[in-house]
Image (cartoon, coloured by chain):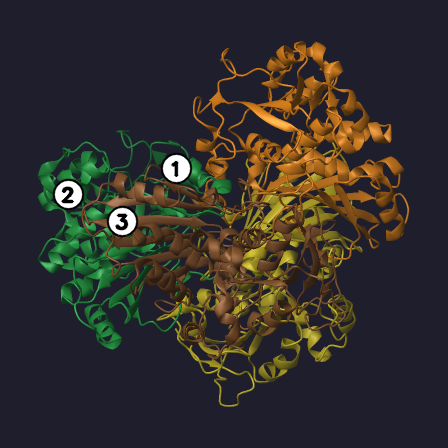
Chain colours: A orange, B yellow, C brown, D green
């Protein structure tokens, strides 16, 4: 079978290398072009030496007209603002586009504007006419639309963990949707490859912090997606934290149950919601689960708990922020967009220790 | 001036070495006896080699009748169940006692029984008649009683961070006391020096987890102390997490404000409550604070935030779990019990990086 | 094609889980039995939760007569002393055996005795008659013998890094073989999954140490293998160190060059020696290489340097101690023993970050 | 007693904050001026929040003529090239100068030139006439000259560990001085506070590397100092490594013994050499020592070993690179320069864990 051709824009970052690692092992894909703003003209294995002998493709400037351009799909593993300018040229040629940023997570200009204001970005989208074509790339909620889409906005890493942790409770109506609090902890790789004094090894090795308290942009897509499920407006209290580790998000989600619920009933709500999902594993409160259980895999592990003393549902949602939170979701979406088996190239348990 | 004589029972653990380090630098104290269940007959600097030349006292079995016994105060840096059996013999001789465990955090047998059931311990206290003499050793709330006490129960590390983070809000009545959620993250040293597969370096280095969801014993003393301040029963939703770092607790505390409050008013409530406190520093939402700001010091840093969208007060409370959360609080209590300046031996900023 | 059946004894340790992870992804292998001394009767995914859904086989006691026994090859991922007692029963049935320990690294009882005395073990081998059948499992030096063997002793992790770093220099005769010094640094996983106060997270997170100075048992096999290449006795000064990280060995190897050599000539000696090797990558002094370049892969990266001021050859040899240093080498050996393509299931670049 | 006044240039780096932390606790010193190139006009506790309430001095531009200038001593905690330009103005006013860089480690222009060429710096010293006044600030070797000096060049961190580890062996003549190999491992803080892709947390957390193989500039001062002791030229093979930890240098030093030596004789050479030293602790091979034994203290721990099989002396030399390797040595030198007890403000055991 002919392999599809993939180009990656932003190949020099963590999102890019994550896609390369996964696609190298994907039987139906060939990487045919890599683009970045730095390290132009060097093999990507100079930037990521572990790739030597596996992927030694040259890195091109995205503006280079002599660069490869024969792709079936292009990944924009780039910050906010890049994909919205570049996507059209690919779409016009029939090339599908997967964007990692917030550029294509919202399907109308007004909603995008609300998001853009949160990140201090220009609030006018560069390609507003493309927005109605885009689909929010969380397969567990939008599989059918993704299958038909040629433009997908990959979800934010925190959003993946919180939405998957909340969707069954919100959809089933067992919780008071005004009571949702998400306390999220992420490893440092969530902030990307760019150096930052706060992530310099000696500053970070034995220290954690909260940041953007009540102001993180991912809450926007959580509220939108969960609002669609609830069929009403939802507001979420969300606090992200940075933890001295590399891979992993653990979101601790608190909601008030509308009425006293037995843990088994709640567990059944979750198991039923995800009964056909390959990448969501639902557990009861039986054991202390760790992010190492999902490290380097595309899984989301959910631990469902009820605090009977306070009537709270407490969900612990764990993902690898660079996998299910980024490149893994991207490959899952690509599989759906091209009609491949959804799990192709993604069925790996990760590594321990 | 004659120095007071201190004995430390449980000198081989993190709580013990923390006390030794602080007391070595305390101008009014002399360590005259060290006790442990292991390493009997060896100098403590064999167990903790950094102490070589600073403290080379021999470790005695607590049962050894030939061991030193001339003390003004004894620290029980021991697990639950030890101090309650040993305290009487010291008290009877006029020696003051400071206990790190839950044994003397509650001043009546019934309350202790509730605590003991949480930790799966024998619910009958070994010395119930001593309980009315004990004081809960959080200086910021009980300074006057501590000054008169000869028996003090040092608070739990999570409790220190959460109670200090909540006390002004609860006391002032600005929050709905039924809405309190504490999401606490601790470094691994909180679990002590004892080996554990979950804290083996390769298992822990890149992994975090929640544990004892809704069931951690420290919630008991939080509810008791905050209930006293509120003059009503309080129930708290509390989830502890273990983070791959050594020192530090960061508790993220969520409460519903009774009415819309300006951040400056809330900040004033906190600043006013702690205006005379040397070891509590109150900050607004102006910057991302880190546990490294309090590492190796006796401070509690509080960052006060209001989420206007959801009407929540969000307090980030940070301590070094081995200092303000353990040995630092113990020395602070000892200073108060002996009429020393409260900050003696504790005014150090910690180290960075 | 019919898959070969593999049994793993010692499935609950790092060597066992490493083999499981690799074999799950190996197209010609089926894992049909797992054995351990602990967690009997539980699925292996209870011990290693990341395996859930990938490998949920029950763990059996190796002594259990009702346990699976239909294998083509058995991996002894066990400490010294276990494989030498168990191997015979499998060999007698025509089942091949791969042992991770020192039990089958030496092909005569006298040499084994020298090794055993180093580790304080019983010096008489339990199955001395099997020793002449065994082959030292370093494929780069013994590929042909491994192909014919039914009993292979997997090399020690430090030995892999030092022998591969030294073999070309020793074989070519460019160095004074009396001058060899190997300074090796390993991540903590090299010590296995068993808890140890020295590897408790808080004790290890910001500390390194040397140990077994001049006394580590792996030097024995290094001297034997390099002596065979040099055709003379070789003595090596070897110092291992433990570093606060999980995966990786970096051995810094110092030897006196017999005469002034140009770096390019020395580099050519190495490139030529390894010209047909898939898992050894030879580099000049051009860049600072890191163990992350080989993390989670089966590669050995060598950086070749000459210190012209002192006439030293300095080789930096890097492996993942759990891959090329353990499970990866085992699978490589298995591939050779069964006539599979040597790289089957092993051609992966690892993950970054 | 009147306190001496100290100014610190380069207060925003690790060397600066280390000096501040130590001097805050020094009974004979007052910090009266802080200078940096960044964060001008802000209190230093904005840069290092743990200092809040301990040191809130404003940071000045070193060029600011309105800045404080009434000092008894100035610390240049700055990179190569800064102190050599600034020192004169202080010296001319009778202010003593302590420089952390290589600028004043060499007392003649020609030797400095050799050093400068190693670091790619301008080879002509900016103040060559000052060089004859400077003293190499390793108190254990140059105590008397330091006492008389008004200009001291603090030694390099690697140099401290290697020179202290070698001095007794070199001075006593028991080793072949042509055989010296130093394999040094440092925590990341040795590279300073400046961000660097190689020290970004996710890149570094589970990876180590060698660098500047045969080319690190610290070897220059090691050879000079040890040559003085040996009264002959010495060349050293030196390889530095970066380890994923924050504080600590462990140097493993290999030398050929001229003749077979009993470990006790060698140990006696070391103990005798350092018998009056307060900050050097000499140990035999009895236990695995760790850098945590010296973390946050001014000690150098030496473990002396003899490999009888190969006739090598193996010394493990451990320091905290930011203390004895930097700010601690600086304060020790200051104490000597001002006639204070040498250990003033430095007698602390560090912290564990």
Q: Residue furthest bottom?
A: B65
Disc 3 is placed on an element classified as strand
Pointer 1 residue: D194
Indicate the chain on which mark 3 is placed.
C
Q: Nearer the viewer, mark 1 or mark 2?
A: 1
Disc 2 is placed on an element classified as loop
Mark 2 is surrounded, within 10 Å at the Cα level, by few (under 14), some (14 to 19) or many (20 or more) other residues, namely few
Gap in angstroms between the C-alphas marked 3 and 1: 33 Å
Residue contact between numbered discs 1 and 2, judged by CB atoms under 8 Å: no
Point out which mark residue D94 bears: 2
Residue closest to the eye, D307 or C178: C178
Up/down of B32 relative to A187, above or below? below
- Is any atom of residue D194 visible in this view? yes
In this rendering, would A243 be left or right of C1? left
Q: Nearer the viewer, mark 2 or mark 3?
A: 3
- Residue shown at the point (31%, 31%) measured from the top left: D61
* Image position, residue A341 (x, y; %): 75, 32
Pointer 3 residue: C313
* Image position, residue D141 (x, y; %): 17, 59
Up/down of A25 relative to B78, above or below? above
Gap in angstroms between the C-alphas marked 2 and 3: 50 Å
Indicate the chain on which mark 2 is placed.
D
Gap in angstroms between the C-alphas marked 1 and 2: 33 Å
Disc 1 is placed on an element classified as loop
Q: Nearer the viewer, mark 3 or mark 1?
A: 3
Q: Quadrant of residue C118?
A: bottom left
- Residue shown at the point (67%, 13%) measured from the top left: A91
In this rendering, would A226 be left or right of A193? right
Q: Quadrant of residue D283?
A: bottom left
Mark 3 is surrounded, within 10 Å at the Cα level, by few (under 14), some (14 to 19) or many (20 or more) other residues, namely many
């Amino acid at each position: 079978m002919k392999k599809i051709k993939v180009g990656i824009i932003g190949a020099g970052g963590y999102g890019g290398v994550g896609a390369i690692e996964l696609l190298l092992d994907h039987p139906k894909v060939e990487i045919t072009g890599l683009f970045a703003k730095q390290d132009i003209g060097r093999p990507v294995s100079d930037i990521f030496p572990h790739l030597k002998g596996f992927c030694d493709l040259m890195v091109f400037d995205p503006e280079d007209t002599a660069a490869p351009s024969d792709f079936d799909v292009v990944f924009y593993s780039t910050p906010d603002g890049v994909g919205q300018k570049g996507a059209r040229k690919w779409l016009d040629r029939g090339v599908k586009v997967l964007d990692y940023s917030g550029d294509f997570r919202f399907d109308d200009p007004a909603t995008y504007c609300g998001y853009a204001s949160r990140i201090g970005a220009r609030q006018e989208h560069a390609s507003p006419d493309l927005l109605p074509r885009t689909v929010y790339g969380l397969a567990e909620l939008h599989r059918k639309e993704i299958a038909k889409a040629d433009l997908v906005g990959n979800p934010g890493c925190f959003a993946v963990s919180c939405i998957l942790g909340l969707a069954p409770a919100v959809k089933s109506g067992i919780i008071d949707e005004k009571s949702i609090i998400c306390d999220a902890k992420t490893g440092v790789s969530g902030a990307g490859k760019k150096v930052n004094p706060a992530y310099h090894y000696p500053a970070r090795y034995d220290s954690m912090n909260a940041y953007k308290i009540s102001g993180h942009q991912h809450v926007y897509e959580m509220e939108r997606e969960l609002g669609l499920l609830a069929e009403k407006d939802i507001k979420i209290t969300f606090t992200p934290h940075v933890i001295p580790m590399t891979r992993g998000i653990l979101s601790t989600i608190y909601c008030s149950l509308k009425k006293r619920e037995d843990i088994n009933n709640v567990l059944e709500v979750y198991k039923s919601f995800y009964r056909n999902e390959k990448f969501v594993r639902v557990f009861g409160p039986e054991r202390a689960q760790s992010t190492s259980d999902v490290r380097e895999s595309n899984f989301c592990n959910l631990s469902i708990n009820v605090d009977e003393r306070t009537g709270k549902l407490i969900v612990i949602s764990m993902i690898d922020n660079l996998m299910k939170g980024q490149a893994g979701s991207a490959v899952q979406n690509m599989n759906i967009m091209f009609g491949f088996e959804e799990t192709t190239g993604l069925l790996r348990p990760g590594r321990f220790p």
